[in-house]
Structure formats: C-alpha cells, structure tokens
Amino acid sequence: MTAPQLEILADKPALVQRALTLVVEAIHSAVADHDYCTLALAGGSTPKPLYSGLAEQDLPWEKLYIFWGDERYVPLDHPDSNGGMAKAAWLDRVPIPPDHLLYAPTLEGDPAASARQYEAMVKSIFGGLQGLGPSQIPRFDLILLGMGDDGHTASLFPHTESLGVDDRLITVGYKGSDPRLTFTAPLINHSHRVMFLVAGADKQTALAQVLAPEGDDEAYPSRLVRPQGELHWLLDRSAVGDLDLASMSIT
C-alpha cells in the first residue's frame, strides 16, 4: 500500500466535483491500460450527485463493468436500494451494456445464498476479463466507499462477524438485524485504487479514530481498508473540523 492521499474540500459540492474528476481519470486510465474498467459503487447520499455527474460525461460506456461494494437486502426498485439509486441517477441514462451491470441479487430470501451467488457473478466476470482461477482474488480498478458516523464502510459494521471473513469475496453484513451483502476486506484491499467520500460534521469522531496511527479495527471497520494500490480520502471541511490530519496516518 502506498501512503494514503488526503484531500480536504470546502464543502460537499466541491468534494463531489473533485470525485467526478478523479473517477473520470481512473476510468480513462484503466481503459487505456487494459481496455476495460471495473468499478464498484458506494451507496448512501454522498455519491448520488457524483453519479448524476457521471451521466453527463463522454465515457467509453461499453468498456465499463459496474458492481456494488454493498447492497441492502431489498428489491432493486426499493427506495433503500443502492443499485436502484445509481440506476436512476446514472445507469439508466447511459448506454452501458446491460450485462456489464452486476446488480447484487437480493430476491433469494436467503442472504447467505445471495452472497454466494454474487460472489460467483464477480468471479465469472473477472475470470473472463483477467483469466483468474477460482481461488484468485479479483482486482478492481476502482472501489468507491463511504464511511458511517460509526466508522463502518460498505456493510462492514463494528464488532460484527463480517469483519473477520477472509475466505470469501462477498459475505453478509448486519446492521442490527438488517442483512446486507458486502464486499469483504480482502476483496476491497486487492483493488488498484480505493476512494473514500466522506462528508458531514457527524463523521468527525469516527474519522479521528479511523485515521489515527493506532486504533481498534473492530470498533472502526474503515481502518481495515489498506489496499495494495492507492488509497484516496476525499473529505469535506465539516467532516474534518479541527482535526489535526498532519499527525494522522493509516498504518
């Protein structure tokens, strides 16, 4: 892992604009390097305007493969669906081939079975793109992540079993009794590039713990994100507050 890159933006609109620039650059770079780009999306409110902005770009749509780092266990047309949000804000507005949109399966009635099904889908796509065997970990070009005010990321919540899963690509994460499908830490950490988008004053306490040189990974799961490639944090000023980021690093 290279040293994390931290950028502080004035506000959420500035953060979204910077994220848009970096995501577009990452897509073009990946396509120039190996003729496709694999991108895993985050849910939540922060990236929604980013997705709307991406819909306005001139991108090599047929070369994009879109996945989700986590998904609530609801139908795609449910208001809480991460996939449904991205579909309405972005994906329905551009000509990405339908078989390049890898929505998480959430209609099985069995979250563990759905996690296995989604893992098989991911392995199948990367097997074709990268020639990976069944035991090899796919390497995404870019994974977008958010961070909750409790320090969770994707659906890796504090003090839950999902944090210790290291033999699967996809597992079931729980927020209370609410099941969600989520990338595991090993899959996230195999990425070429991971980008956190963090906005809002309610994130200050968790951010201080996550970026501290030493801390509790179980209590603040975003600390588990230590990718082989680049780690980029985009933070708005309200999320940083008066934290002294110069004294912090992710180890």
Image: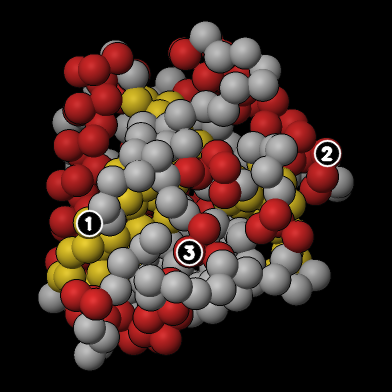
Q: Position of residue 88 (x, y in %)?
A: 43, 48
The label nearer to you, 1 versus 2, is: 1
Q: Which residue type does callout 1 highlight?
A: Gln
Asked which quadrant contains residue 48, the reply is bottom left
Which amino acid, mark 3? Arg
Which residue is identified by label 3? 223
Of 89 and 220, which appears nearest the observer?
A: 220
For the residues marked 1 and 3, what is the alpha-carbon distance in whole angstroms?
15 Å
Q: Residue at x 55, y 39 (%)?
A: 187
Local secondary structure at mark 3? helix
For the residue carrying disc 2, how many other residues have a C-alpha within 10 Å: few (<14), some (14-19), or many (20+)? some
First in sequence, mark 1 or 2: give its number: 1
Residue for point 36% across, 35% down: 192
Number of numbered discs present?
3
Q: Quadrant of the N terminus?
A: top left
Looking at the rendered structure, the secondary structure element under dot 2 is: helix
Which is more N-terminal, label 3 or label 1?
Answer: 1
The spot of residue 92 in percent (x, y) is: 41, 38
* Color encoding of the figure: secondary structure
Q: Secondary structure at mark 1?
A: strand
Look at 56% across and 73% down and name the residue there: 216
Occupied quadrant, residue 155: bottom right
Mark 3 or mark 2, which is nearer the start of the sequence? 2
Q: Where is residue 55 drawn, in percent x and y? A: 27, 41
Query: Badge 3, how many Cα within 10 Å: few under 14, some, many 20+?
Result: many
Question: What separation in Å lies between label 1 and label 2 (alpha carbons)?
Answer: 37 Å
In three-dimensional space, the C-alpha distance between marks 2 and 3, rounded to whole angstroms, equals 28 Å
Q: Which residue is mark 2?
A: 113
Disc 1 designates what residue? 5
**Relative to 73, is 249 above or below?**
below
